[in-house]
């Protein structure tokens, strides 16, 4: 482990959470810029040495990363102490960091007068040493929490393009969705809105005779905002209840397409990081389109012989006259329509996610006459 610079420590200028995060970045730079994953491994090693079970010892990588980010409204002092130990600080230095965290939390609560002389850092003020380390504005909830309320939650905002994000790129609001804690009543409202989006899309397509589908906008939104299986629920209900008179038998078999799309969207954003940037999200929508096509084509060919009364039937028929093969025509026509459709659905979901995220953050933000909620 690289030796840290003993001069890099919390100090008077670190009486805010932003300044504390900046000092952490300096400490990480002085320690040789270990990756956030490496820091989590070191923390897990420390915890196991203290007797914490191995399956509980490793913190989330995002949780560790968030401690280094500016723009936070609260911070986990215990985790900061573990981080600085992982970066080579002694126990005495770690105690100073713990004291600095208390100072910054009090300042974030809007009560600077509560900071005592005992808690205030008295070490020398230094200029940032070594390489300049970019920080990211925004806040994030601790991914280890399981509370299902929005009040006091500390969600992630959209990040500045490429600024210190561990994966670079141009982050999207979807990167924050897994950290949101949404109350049951809000979740029910979001599900109803998502179902309405799907059904509205169907009405628009049927009315205008379009060759795309637009019946998965709500599925995508629910999958990335609430989770993949909530998206799957919206998709199933859409296909089972939204077929309309005389179309239920056509709509129902395609519920599986909606489910597959929801799972790829949801897990793609929440587990595999495809919501971290616009290019990644673009790729995710293309993957969703391909997955949905692979599921839809056998249904179209073997159940409906390529004709469902949808606007894409004309495209498929034209391709069939060219290729003289039903399977190739259906796959090609559906793939083209699905790609356009999933790009539209995905980016509408992106806009919806940003709106939902903003509303939840607005409700969670402390009132001007009330101190901010901070960690104990």
Image: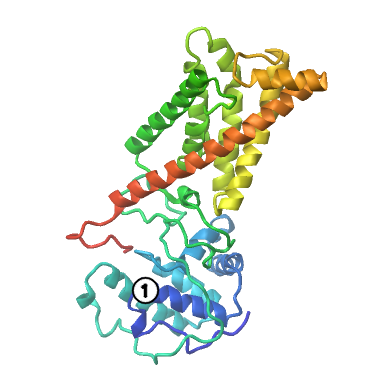
Which residue is at a point 26% across and 85% down the rendered structure image? 117
Quadrant hosting residue 120 = bottom left
Q: Is residue 151 above or below residue 5?
A: above
Element under disc 1: helix
Q: Nearer the viewer, residue 86 or 156?
A: 156
- Number of numbered discs present? 1
Residue that carries the numbered disc 1 in the rendered image: 101
Residue 336 in view of the camera:
yes
Residue 181 in view of the camera:
no
| Residue closest to the far bottom | 124
Q: Which colour scheme appears in the figure? A: rainbow
Location of residue 253 in the rendering, given as x and y in whole percent from the top left corner:
60, 17
Location of residue 74 in the rendering, given as x and y in whole percent from the top left corner:
35, 64
Quarter occupied by the C terminus: bottom left
Which residue is at a point 55% across and 74% down the rendered structure image? 86
Q: Is residue 132 left or right of residue 14?
A: right
| Residue closest to the far right | 324
């Amino acid at each position: 482990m690289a030796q840290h610079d003993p001069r890099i420590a919390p100090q008077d200028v670190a009486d805010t959470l932003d300044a504390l995060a900046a000092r952490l970045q300096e400490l990480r730079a002085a320690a040789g810029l270990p990756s956030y994953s490496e820091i989590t491994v070191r923390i897990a090693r420390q915890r196991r040495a203290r007797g914490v079970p191995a399956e509980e010892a490793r913190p989330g990588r995002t949780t560790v990363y968030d401690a280094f980010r500016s723009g936070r409204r609260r911070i986990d002092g215990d985790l900061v102490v573990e981080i600085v130990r992982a970066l080579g600080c002694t126990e005495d230095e770690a105690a100073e960091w713990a004291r600095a965290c208390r100072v910054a939390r009090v300042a974030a609560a809007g009560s600077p007068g509560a900071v005592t002389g005992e808690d205030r850092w008295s070490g020398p003020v230094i200029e940032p040493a070594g390489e300049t380390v970019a920080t990211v504005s925004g806040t994030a909830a601790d991914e280890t929490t399981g509370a299902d309320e929005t009040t006091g939650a500390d969600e992630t905002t959209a990040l500045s393009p490429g600024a210190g994000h561990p994966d670079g790129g141009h982050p999207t609001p979807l990167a924050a969705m897994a950290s949101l804690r949404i109350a049951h009543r809000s979740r029910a409202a979001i599900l109803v809105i998502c179902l309405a989006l799907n059904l509205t899309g169907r009405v628009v397509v049927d009315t205008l005779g379009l060759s795309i589908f637009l019946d998965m906008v709500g599925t995508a939104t629910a999958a990335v905002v609430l989770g993949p299986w909530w998206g799957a629920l919206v998709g199933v209900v859409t296909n089972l209840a939204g077929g309309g008179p005389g179309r239920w038998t056509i709509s129902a078999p395609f519920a599986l397409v909606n489910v597959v799309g929801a799972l790829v969207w949801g897990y793609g954003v929440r587990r595999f990081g495809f919501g971290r940037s616009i290019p990644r999200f673009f790729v995710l929508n293309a993957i969703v389109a391909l997955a949905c096509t692979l599921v839809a084509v056998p249904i179209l060919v073997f159940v409906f012989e390529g004709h469902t009364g949808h606007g894409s039937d004309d495209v498929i028929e034209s391709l069939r006259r060219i290729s003289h093969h039903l399977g190739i025509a259906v796959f090609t026509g559906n793939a083209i329509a699905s790609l356009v459709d999933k790009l539209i659905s995905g980016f509408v979901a992106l806009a919806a996610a940003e709106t939902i995220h903003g509303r939840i953050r607005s409700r969670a933000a402390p009132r001007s006459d009330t101190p901010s909620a901070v960690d104990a």
